[in-house]
Image: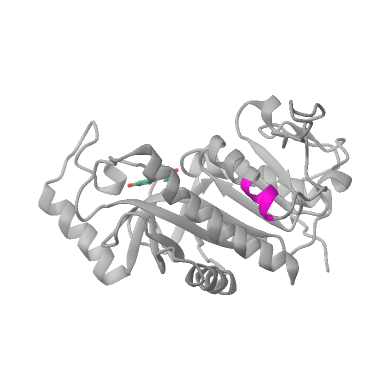
Amino acid sequence: MPQFTLKNPHLGKNDHLYHLGILTSDDLEQRFGDIKFVCLGGKQSRMKDFADYLFEKLRQPQNSHFEKAVDESGGKTLRNISKCAGRYSMYKVGDVLLVSHGIGTASLSVVLNEVFKLLHYAGCQNDVKFIRIGTSGGLGVLPGTVVITDQPYDATLSPDFLHVSIGRSQRSPCKTCPEMRESLLKVSKGSDIPAILGNTMSTDDFFEGQCRLDGAFCDYTNEDKAIFLQKAHDEWGIKNVEMESTCLSAMCYKAGLKCAIVCVTFLDRLQGDTVKGEPAQFDEWQKQLYVIVGEYIAESIKT
Ligand code: R2B
Ligand code: URA
C-alpha cells in the first residue's frame, strides 16, 4: 500500500505540530505509522469518552498510547497526547486516532492541517479513513435520529467549501465516501438506532447562520426562516445542520482521503430553535454514534 504523502513542496523534515504539541523528532513513524482511522468530534470530553469505549470494543489493543503511571486498580489509562498544547485532545486506540476539533471551520481546519501532516510524517498508508461524530439540528426528523451525510452544503446551499488563501476566495468540492456511508448505514440497520442517509447543511455560525431567531441578533422574520429551512429540506434534501461537514469533506477530498460524517440530531429545527432537554438524554443519543462507528471500525479492522 502506498504511503500517504502531502504535495506541499515547502514541507521539510523539521516541523512543529504546534496545536497538537508534537515535533517531527518525536519518533512519529514508530508511534503513529499504524493509524488506519481518524475519528473527530467537537468536544474534548466526547473524544475521551469514545476513546475509552473503543478501547474496550477493540479488546484493549496494545498499540494504544497510555499514561506512564497505572491507575489505582493497576489498569492502564489512555493518554491525552495533545494535553501539553492545551487546545485539542488526542488519543490513540490501536489503529485509531481520536481528535477533538472544537466548534466550526476555523478550529477544525487548524487541527486537520496538523493531523494530515502527522500522517504524512509518520509514513501512514494512503487509505486512512476519517469519520466525524457530531451533534446537529435536524430538519423534519425526530430528535435522536442519526444522520449519515450524503452531500454537505454550505449555508447558501452550495455543495462546496468557501475559504480564503492569499486574499482570494476559493471554492473546493465537498465529497463523502459512498462505501463508508453505505457501510455505516448497514451497521446501523443491524441495531435499533434510528439512522438515515441525508444531506447536511454546514454553517459558520450557530445562530443567524442556522436561521435561529433566538441569537443576540435577528434581521429576518419567523416566516423568512421557515421558508428557507423548508426549502432546504424539500429541494436540497437537507436532513441536518451543523458546522464542520463542508470543511472536513473538502479538506479530506483535496488530500485524497476518504471521509464520512455521522451526526445525531438534538432537535427538529422545523419545530424550534432552542436546544433543550435532559443532559442524560443527549448523552444517550451521542452514545449511539459510538455504537455505529465503533462497530464499523471493529468490522473494518477484522476484514
Ligand atoms: C454541532 O454542534 C456544535 C455547535 O453547538 C458544532 O460544532 C456543530 O457542528
Ligand atoms: N449543533 C448545531 O450546529 N446546530 C444545532 O442545532 C444543534 C447542534
Q: Position of residue 61 (x, y in %)?
A: 78, 51
Q: Is residue 59 above or below residue 175?
A: above
Residues shaded magenta:
53-57
Judged left or right of residue 225, residue 204 is right
Q: Evaluate whether residue 74 shows in this view.
A: yes
Magenta stretch: residue 54 in it?
yes
Judged left or right of residue 258, residue 283 is left
Magenta stretch: residue 192 in it?
no
Which quadrant of the view contains residue 131? bottom right
Q: Position of residue 45 (x, y in %)?
A: 55, 35
Residue at figure coordinates x 68%, y 49% from the top left: 56
Q: Position of residue 104 (x, y in %)?
A: 46, 42
Residue at figure coordinates x 40%, y 64% from the top left: 194
Name the image quarter holding the N terminus. Answer: bottom right
Q: Give the dominant element type of the magenta stretch: helix, strand or loop.
A: helix
Q: Evaluate whether residue 256 shows in this view.
A: no
Report the number of discs.
0
* Residue closest to the eye, 218 or 278: 278
Judged left or right of residue 180, residue 263 is left
Residue at figure coordinates x 23%, y 45% from the top left: 273
